[in-house]
Amino acid sequence: MKKSIYLILISILFINTAIASGDTRNIKEPVNPSSCIVLKANNKNNTSLIQKSIDTCAKQNKVVELKSDNENFHFYSGPINIPSNGGLLINKGTILSAIPDPKLYDNGNNKCGKLDNIGKSCKPFITVNNSENSGIYGEGIIDGQGNSAMKGSTKTWWNLASEAQKKNQSQNVPRLIVIKNSKNFTLYKISLKNSPNFHVSTNNVNGLTAWSVNINTPADARNTDGIDPGSSTNVTIAHSYISTGDDNVAIKASNGPTSHVSIINNNFGKGHGMSIGSETLGKVNNILVDGLSMNGTTSGLRIKSDKSKGGLVNSITYKNICIKDVKNPIYLDMFYNKNAKGNKIPQFKDIHFESVKVLTPGNFIFNGIKGNNIEVTFENVSIKKGSIIKMDNTSSKGTLEENATGNICPTRK
């Protein structure tokens, strides 16, 4: 009998550890790999040279180093691909800029740089496909030039995105970095800015490490998500600063599950918050957000889905969170698209909030579907007086205490 009780206790301990573990890999701070070729900036179009050099170095398990040269610090390029065992090392003071020419990114439909009802006619600036053990390193900058006029037009990529919103259409613009069908990709100390669309997105990836990454794009740049892990597993985003025009981080699961994600010691500026969804039909589970300061995002901790693309979201832990000047500090919504139809009903289960402090009044919204309640637990969650709490079809344990003190969220390191 005692042995049975002991085994049950061990099982419970294991389950709780697994829920809070996030990434199952043993992640340590990356190091810059060796380079086999050093390219010096010349402020010209270097697409062919960069691609050829990447391919050459990858065969030696090394990367290409991009370096400024006196007053020259710009490399310009069209779309490039990163194969297995290769990548880029961009030195501090060096900028790799995406040439804003729709023809370079067009996937053959002659629609890149235009509006339609689909919005998938542009190649990314950097593609990582069927690749292992590759990455982008260094303290330099990758600039998507979303704010620059497209060749042959007075409009920028961002102008096109705004026009699409007004006309209820989709913009055909490139994403900055897309990683798919790959294993163990690393982003280390790199700065990303001005992406025409999402900065980093993944699909069917096992192993993504983003460490000390800086993403800084204006708040009014539409659809410029920071990092979007999609249908992927074993993801760590750590010690980074993200300020964008859309979700700072959005965990998605459209064509497969997303699981074992760790968001550790990050700082968010402008943006739409730490999001899960809206595509969750592939299931999202085992997500750990530990150590996060949010200053000025529109939403804070956010799970969003609807009847057209909902699925199970469970085993989610938020802990050691500080939120300030955020309209909706916690927002769990099963009606993200109020007009959505279908039978893909969202399920938000085992959502745990621990040691969360909200320093300014805001809206705490839990909007569940009748008969499919949201299930949340609060432990040491402090909010400000004057906040609005709205719970519909939500089952909760613990309370939101109106006793938050302090005026500043700590800078996470």
Image (cartoon, helix red, strand yellow):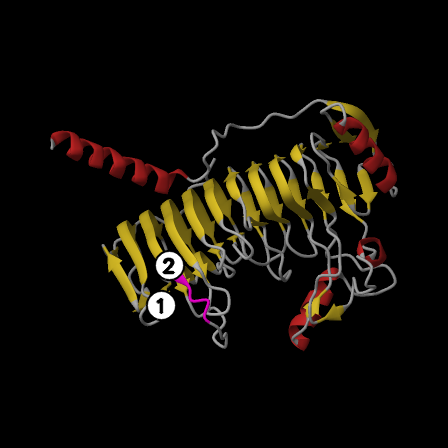
**Is residue 178 depicted above or below 57 in this figure?**
below
Q: In this view, does 133 lie to the left or right of 59?
A: left
Residue occupied by mark 2: 348
Query: Badge 1 local density, few (<14 within 10 Å), some, or many (20+)?
Result: many
Examine the rendering and report whether any part of residue 71 can be seen. no
Q: Give the range drawn in magenta.
A: 343-347
Residue 351 percent coordinates (x, y)? 34, 53
Q: Can you name the residue that lies furthest to the left here?
A: 1
Q: Which SS class for mark 1? A: loop
Is 316 covered by the magenta stretch? no
**Residue 368, numbered circle:** 1
Going by the numbered disc 2, the residue's amino acid type is Phe
- Residue 221 placement: quadrant: bottom right
C-alpha separation, residue under disc 1 versus residue under disc 2: 8 Å
Q: In this view, does 167 lie to the left or right of 51?
A: left
Residue 275 percent coordinates (x, y)? 48, 55
Going by the numbered disc 1, the residue's amino acid type is Gly
- Residue 254 placement: quadrant: bottom right
**Residue 186, numbered circle:** none
- Of the pair 222 and 136, the residue shown nearer to us: 136
Mark before the other along the chain sequence, 1 or 2 = 2
